[in-house]
């Protein structure tokens, strides 16, 4: 009886061990099937051997080859060591020809030095830059490059991911064209209203004022004469308002002259109408600006100067025209009471006018940055776009 | 009595100017043209020496501007002095008019000044509205 019980226990133990080994084997198989194993150790007649599962690279390789981004690995000097099919397709070439080529030579000449800079600044965390590649057919292809070190130093290699951004650039150009059209339509409408004010309403007011003067030629009581004088004075004020409105709606200085001339005129006008002294500093003339952008800039700067008059509590402002890092820039600043820029700009109601200016400038490719703190004045910088050459 | 060719496209303004020139300046009006083209046509219809002592020309006219008209009158009829009249006081209009050969520039909202300008130019002088020096 004792012997039988012992036998049963041995059978039970063996069954448990077999169950464990089966579970272990199934887990190993699952790991292999799911590409979680790169290699395993086998005991052969000639000793222990490590067997590499080359197939485990297949999914990675498939992923790199099928992704929509160009993927390239470079050695330290920028020579291409590997590239995927998508990158070759983007450059209208083939991988065999691209491997061994210096990556720098695939970039349009005017942006090669920019690439050299970011290439040498690359870290394991990566750097990003929009750059233009030149295809085998000579076409220009805008891409977003992400450059990463593969190890801790450049010796381990460098990975480059290239994303085709030509659709985005085209969309931006379309938006810019629509915004330009909107600015042109608005300017045309301003011009039309300005002409109506000048060519019709103002002429009628002149005529009425003159006709009133004929009444003075007949014998009038002193009281009637005084009333006529008052009417004529009111008409003179109406004429002045109409004239100013007509000029402000469509300043003649904007028709064909440069931004500096328009700013000079605006400075004079702000002083004359609002007593605001505008110190105009022109380090650059900025005379190569598209006429529609010039009109929008003029209107934006005028609005910003109005803001100084209304809110800053000072009678002096400064407008600077200059180049900063290759970008044409215009800065409007004052030493007035300032405000909490973050709080104001984060509230669409309080920043309504500024946000409209910012949106319209953005649509034409400009960037507007605002710096202000209570008691420390305000500085608003408008950075103009550098024209990108189209493909 | 001096005779004036008035070139003004706005009807009410033209009628007012005619009345002012006749009644307050004692001038005669040779013709009222509504455009530069009409003015040139009227001048060409006159005899070799048009009996006009002065052309009073609005700066802004339909099609050809008043400045262009003055330039053409000075070329074709150098004996006719031109005086510009306008509601606009911008420097470039004034400068453009003088470069084209106008002998003066007056503003429409001061008709006494217009009469003063007409008189000065008829006497062989030049005249700029006093308001211009105060503005742009």
Image (cartoon, rainbow, N blue to C red):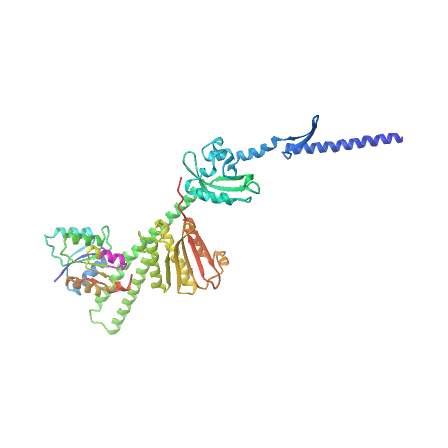
Residue drawn at 80 percent across, 32 percent down: A13
Q: Quadrant of residue A318?
A: bottom left
Residue drawn at 38 percent across, 53 percent down: A297
- Picture coordinates of residue A94, whole percent (x, y): 47, 31
Looking at the picture, tell me which residue is in the foreground, A107 or B88.
Answer: A107
Q: Is residue A10 left or right of residue A370?
A: right
The C terminus of chain A sits in image quarter: top left
- Picture coordinates of residue A172, whole percent (x, y): 43, 44
Q: Is residue A53 visible?
A: yes
Q: Give the residues in magenta.
A: B86-97
- Can you name the residue that lies furthest to the top here? A45
Q: Is residue A353 visible?
A: no
Q: Is residue A239 above or below residue A91?
A: below
Looking at the picture, tell me which residue is in the foreground, A119 or A272.
Answer: A119
Check residue B87 for magenta coloring: yes
Q: Is residue B41 above or below residue A79?
A: below
């Amino acid at each position: 009886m004792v012997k039988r019980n012992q036998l049963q226990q041995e059978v039970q133990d063996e069954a448990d061990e077999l169950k464990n080994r089966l579970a272990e084997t199934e887990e190993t198989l699952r790991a292999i099937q799911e590409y979680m194993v790169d290699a395993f150790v086998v005991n052969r007649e000639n000793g222990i051997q490590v067997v590499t599962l080359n197939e485990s690279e297949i999914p990675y390789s498939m992923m790199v080859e099928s992704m929509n981004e160009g993927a390239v690995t470079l050695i330290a000097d920028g020579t291409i060591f590997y590239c995927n099919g998508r990158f070759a397709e983007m450059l209208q070439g083939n991988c065999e020809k691209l491997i061994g080529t210096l990556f720098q030579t695939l970039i349009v000449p005017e942006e090669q030095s920019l690439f050299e800079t970011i290439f040498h600044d690359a870290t394991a965390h990566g750097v990003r830059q929009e750059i233009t590649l030149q295809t085998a057919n000579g076409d220009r292809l805008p891409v977003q490059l992400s450059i990463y070190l593969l190890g801790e130093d450049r010796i381990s290699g460098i990975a480059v991911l290239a994303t085709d951004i030509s659709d985005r650039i085209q969309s931006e150009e379309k938006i810019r064209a629509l915004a330009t059209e909107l600015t042109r339509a608005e300017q045309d409408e301003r011009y039309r209203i300005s002409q109506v004010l000048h060519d019709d309403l103002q002429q009628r007011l002149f005529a009425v004022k003159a006709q009133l003067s004929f009444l003075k030629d007949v014998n009038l009581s002193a009281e009637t004469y005084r009333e006529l004088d008052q009417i004529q004075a009111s008409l003179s004020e109406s004429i002045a308002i109409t004239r100013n409105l007509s000029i402000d709606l469509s300043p003649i200085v904007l028709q064909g002259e440069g931004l500096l001339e328009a700013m000079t005129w605006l400075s004079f006008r702000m002083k004359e109408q609002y007593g605001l002294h505008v110190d105009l500093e022109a380090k650059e003339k900025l005379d190569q600006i598209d006429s529609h952008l010039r009109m929008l800039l003029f209107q934006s700067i005028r609005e910003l100067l109005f803001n100084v008059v209304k809110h800053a509590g000072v009678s002096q402002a400064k407008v600077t025209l200059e180049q900063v890092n290759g970008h044409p820039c215009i800065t409007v600043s004052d030493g007035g009471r300032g405000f909490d820029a973050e709080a104001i700009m984060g509230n669409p109601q309080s920043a309504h006018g500024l946000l409209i200016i910012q949106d319209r400038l953005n649509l034409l490719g400009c960037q507007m940055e605002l710096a202000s703190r209570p008691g420390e004045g305000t500085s608003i910088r408008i950075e103009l776009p550098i024209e990108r050459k189209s493909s | 009595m001096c005779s004036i060719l008035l070139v003004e496209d706005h009807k009410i303004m033209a009628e007012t100017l005619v009345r002012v020139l006749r009644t307050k300046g004692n001038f005669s009006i040779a013709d009222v043209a509504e455009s530069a083209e009409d003015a040139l046509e009227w001048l060409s219809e006159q005899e070799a020496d048009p009996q006009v002592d002065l052309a009073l020309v609005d700066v802004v006219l339909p099609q050809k501007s008043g400045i262009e008209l003055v330039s053409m009158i000075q070329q074709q009829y150098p004996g006719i002095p031109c005086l510009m009249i306008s509601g606009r006081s911008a420097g470039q209009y004034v400068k453009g008019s003088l470069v084209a050969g106008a002998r003066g520039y007056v503003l429409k909202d001061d008709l006494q000044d217009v009469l003063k300008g007409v008189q000065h130019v008829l006497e062989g002088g030049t005249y700029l509205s006093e308001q211009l020096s105060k503005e742009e």
